[in-house]
Amino acid sequence: MGAFFSSLGRTITAGVVILIVIVLAASGLTDGGARGNDLFIVRWLHVMAGVMWIGLLWYFNFVQTPSMPKIPDDQKPAVSKVIAPAALFWFRWSALATMVLGLLLAYMNHYLIPAMTLTKGVHAIGIGMWLGLIMAFNVWMIIWPNQKKALGIVTVSPEEKAAAAKLAGMTSRINTMLSIPMLFCMVAQSHGGL
Ligand code: HEM
């Protein structure tokens, strides 16, 4: 048991197997068969990617950044050289996956343009999408390039490093702020929040 869960790959595979069993069992309980369709699978993948993205964003803001001043200087590299680069890897790629899957969802729902132009009826998801797109832009165009300097992945002067850390931190805070209305708008469209 312990050996099984020591492997992340096996753990994720087991989660997918449990999902398949549930879908098959549930489809046996309903007349219409499994309710899964292409749209639903894309929506599920979108939410999975989004949870990873925002989960890591909140990890940075709720856990890592506030903990750094409490860590002795000689131990800080464990975070800046090992944990932060790994977290940033999953953070930026899950952000991209969330965005691509989200845009695909809107396209499959036939409201990509109406939502982006905030047409009445799809304005809630449109606002959520714009907030998500701004956040994804911030991840790839501001946070990641500046974190590369701040963490020493690319070498710059100490002044530039300090400025980059400040800008990345500030932008990460802005994304944390935007995540609150963004998530409300994401769910409001289908579940009557607006
Ligand atoms: C660029 C960013 C994003 C875009 C373009 C986008 C787009 C969309 C679209 C079009 C839908 C409607 C899907 C449907 O009802 O068929 C949706 C729903 C949703 N999105 Fe996003 N999204 C983005 C970011 C995020 C993020 C970061 C999360 C975080 C978890 C998220 C979570 C959700 C959730 C929970 C739903 C509701 C699903 C439901 O009501 O069944 N989205 N998104």
Image (cartoon, rainbow, N blue to C red):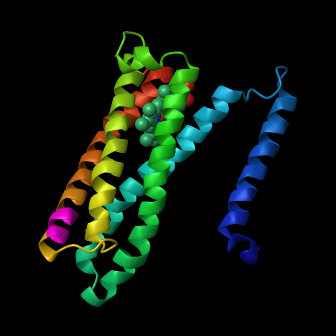
> In the figure, 115 relative to 169: above or below?
above
The residue located at (20%, 55%) in the rendering is 170
Q: Residue shown at 43%/17% (left/top)?
A: 113
Q: Please give left or right for residue 20 compared with residue 189 in the image.
A: right
Q: Is residue 104 above or below residue 153?
A: above
Task: Tell me where residue 117 sits by quadrant.
Answer: top left
Q: Where is residue 74 shown, x and y percent of the image?
A: 29, 90
Q: Residue at x 61, y 37 (%)?
A: 44
Q: Is residue 54 visible?
A: yes
Residue lying furthest bottom in this view? 74
Looking at the rendered image, the quarter that the N terminus falls into is: bottom right
Is 1 above or below relative to 116?
A: below
Answer left or right for 82 relative to 134: right
Residue 50 in sight here: no
Q: Residue at x 79, y 29 (%)?
A: 34
The spot of residue 86 in percent (x, y) is 46, 68
Can you name the residue that lies furthest to the right here?
28
**Magenta stretch encompasses residue 123:** no
Number of marks present in the image shown: 0
Splitting the image into 4 quarters, where does residue 3 fall?
A: bottom right
Q: Position of residue 190 (x, y in %)?
A: 50, 21
Q: To which quarter of the image does residue 160 belong? A: bottom left
* Region of the chain picked out in magenta, as a range: 160-165
Seen from the viewer's position, the closer of residues 115 and 4 is 115
Q: Residue furthest left?
A: 159
On screen, residue 81 above or below 61: below
Whole-percent x, y for residue 61 in the image? 31, 59
Apparent side of residue 111 relative to residue 2 in the rendered image (left or right): left
Image quadrant holding the C terminus, namely: top left
